[in-house]
């Protein structure tokens, strides 16, 4: 089994992740729509006024959990990661984020409208993962916890 390919496939199928941030030793978790690029970088789009967005600016160390919909009867599979997050300000980085995010999650028009909002301006963010943990009893029944480090 090619672990990197399994993780990439899982990220392509999933759309929603739980993002965990922390500030002053107080963790916070939220849900965000995401997309991943070919290098397994994770992108999301959020208001700069949200708690998780403010916390990323002060502490870039984040973690996330991604689980595809399933029932208790299904064989367990899930993906967790840890990495460094940042708001994207460079036009090249924003263009890359838009190329993987738009139409997968929101249309170009919706993204443009959110970015121009005066009440709740949105920006793109990226996680550069340091570690993925795939818990996968489907493909690794003998040893379901598989790690991919960067």
Image: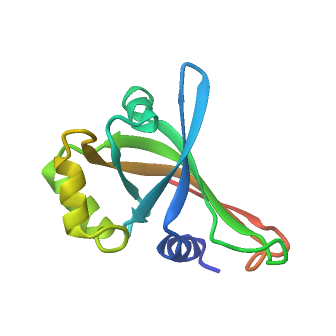
Image coordinates of residue 77 in percent, x first then y, are 71, 70
Indicate whether 33 appears above or below 2.
Answer: above
Q: Quadrant of residue 107?
A: bottom left
Colouring method of the image: rainbow
- Please provide percent x and percent y for residue 21: 53, 36
Q: Position of residue 78 (x, y in %)?
A: 68, 65
Name the residue rendered at 56%, 73% in the picture: 10
In this rendering, would 27 be left or right of 113? right
Q: Nearer the viewer, residue 6 or 34?
A: 34
Q: Is residue 126 left or right of residue 64?
A: left
> Residue at coordinates 41% horizontally, 42% vertically from top-left?
85
Image location (x, y in percent) of residue 87: 30, 41
Kindly identify the residue that appears in the image at 33 percent across and 43 percent down: 47
Residue at far top of view: 24
Q: Is residue 25 above or below residue 114?
A: above
67 lies left or right of 51: right
Taking 69 as reference, is 33 above or below it?
Answer: above
Rendered-image quadrant of the N terminus:
bottom right
Residue furthest to the front: 119
Q: Which quarter of the picture shows residue 86? A: top left
Q: Looking at the image, how many numbered discs can be counted on the residues?
A: 0
Quarter location, residue 148: bottom right
Residue at 85% from the left image edge and 73% from the top image edge: 142
């Amino acid at each position: 089994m090619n672990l990197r390919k399994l993780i990439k496939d899982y990220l392509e199928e999933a759309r929603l992740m739980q993002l965990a941030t922390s500030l002053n030793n107080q963790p916070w978790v939220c849900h965000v729509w995401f997309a991943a690029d070919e290098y397994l970088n994770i992108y999301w789009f959020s208001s700069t006024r949200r708690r998780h967005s403010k916390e990323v600016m002060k502490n870039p160390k984040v973690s996330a959990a991604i689980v595809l919909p399933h029932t208790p009867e299904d064989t367990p599979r899930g993906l967790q990661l840890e990495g460094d997050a940042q708001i994207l300000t460079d036009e090249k980085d924003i263009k890359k984020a838009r190329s993987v995010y738009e139409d997968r999650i929101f249309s170009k028009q919706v993204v443009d409208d959110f970015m121009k909002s005066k009440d709740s301006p949105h920006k793109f963010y990226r996680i550069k993962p340091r570690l993925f943990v795939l818990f996968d009893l489907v493909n690794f029944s003998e040893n379901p916890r598989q790690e991919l480090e960067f």
